Image (cartoon, helix red, strand yellow):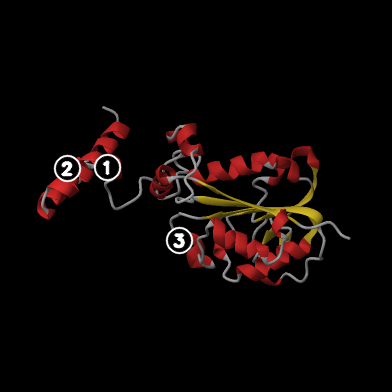
Amino acid sequence: MNAHLKTKMGRTLRSIAQRLFSHSARRWIQRHTRWPPVGRARLGSLRRFTPISPVWGFDRGLPIDRYYIERFLTTHATDIRGHVLEIKEDLYSSRFGGDRVNRIDVLHPEEGNPAATIVADLTCAGQIPADTFDCIVLTQTLTFIYDVRAAVATLYRILKPDGVLLATVSGISKISREDMDRWGHYWSFTTQSSQRLFDEFFPEAKITVNAHGNVLTAVALLHGLASEELSPKELDYCDPDYQVLITIRAVKPEAV
C-alpha cells in the first residue's frame, strides 16, 4: 500500500471516528492512523544535535544553496556582460559571463582583500560613479547588510540604464557564524519581503522574484548535505512554503 493511499484511508477513518467514537477514542485513532504513525518517523542519520557537515556541505560536494544559485545564473547567463561588478571575489562573473564580459570589478567593504578592485560599503558608496555597470552579480550578500534599503539604492544608482542586477538571498538557512562575528548576519528573506524591498527602487515590471526549495532540501541544507546526495527531481521541486533561496533579477530602466 503506497503512502498516498494510506493517507487517504487515514482521513476516511478519522472522519468516521468523529461521528462514532468518544473524544479519547478518537485521539487514539488519530495517533495510529497518521502515516508514519506518531513516534514512528525514521530520522536515521538526522537524529542528532549537530549538523552532518558544519561547513554547509562544501566537504561533501556542492552545497544545496549553491545548486540553486548556479542554476539561476545559468538561466540568466546572457545578462552577465560588459562591465560587471561582483562582491568579494570573481566567483561567477567569468564563469557564467565568458567572453561577453570585458571588465570585472570586485567590491569588498574593507582593505586587505587582494581580489578587490573597489573598497566600499554598499550602503554609502558615493565614490562609485552612477551608471557604471552593465551587470551586478550579488550572491548571498544582503543578508549581512543591516541597512538593506541603502544598499539596494546604491545598486540601482551604479547600474547603467538597462543594466541587470542578479541577486540571491537566503530564506531558510543556518547562521553564518564567521560573517555574523565579522560584520553581522541580519536577515532572512521571503519572496514577499524581497519583492517589496526591490519595488522601492526598481519598476515592478522590471523585477522577477522566485523561490527555490522544499522541505527536503531545507532539511538537507541545514544538515550540510550536498546537492549530489539528492536527485534532480528532489532538488528542483518547489514548495513556496519552504523557501530555501530567493533569486531576484532586476533591470534598471533605459534612459528616456
Q: Nearer the viewer, residue 2 or 194?
A: 2
Q: Mark 2: few, some, or many residues within 10 Å (few <14, many ≥20)?
A: some
Q: Which residue is at a point 29% across and 29% down the rendered structure image?
A: 2
Disc tally is 3
- Which badge, 1 or 3, comes first in the chain's sequence? 1
Q: Secondary structure at mark 3?
A: helix
Residue 230: give x, y in percent of width and height: 43, 35
Q: CA distance from mark 1 to mark 3?
A: 26 Å
State the quadrant of the C terminus: bottom right
Location of residue 202 (image quadrant): bottom right
Residue 64: give x, y in percent of width and height: 49, 43
Q: Nearer the viewer, mark 1 or mark 2?
A: 2
Residue tagged by mark 1? 43
Farthest residue toward the top?
Answer: 1
Residue tagged by mark 2? 32
In the image, 223: left or right of 11?
A: right
In the image, 121: left or right of 84?
A: left
Residue 105: give x, y in percent of width and height: 75, 54
Residue tagged by mark 3? 177
Q: Which residue is at a point 69% across and 40% down the rendered structure image?
A: 96
Q: Amino acid at mark 3?
A: Arg
Q: Mark 3: few, some, or many residues within 10 Å (few <14, many ≥20)?
A: few
Q: CA distance from mark 2 to mark 3?
A: 41 Å
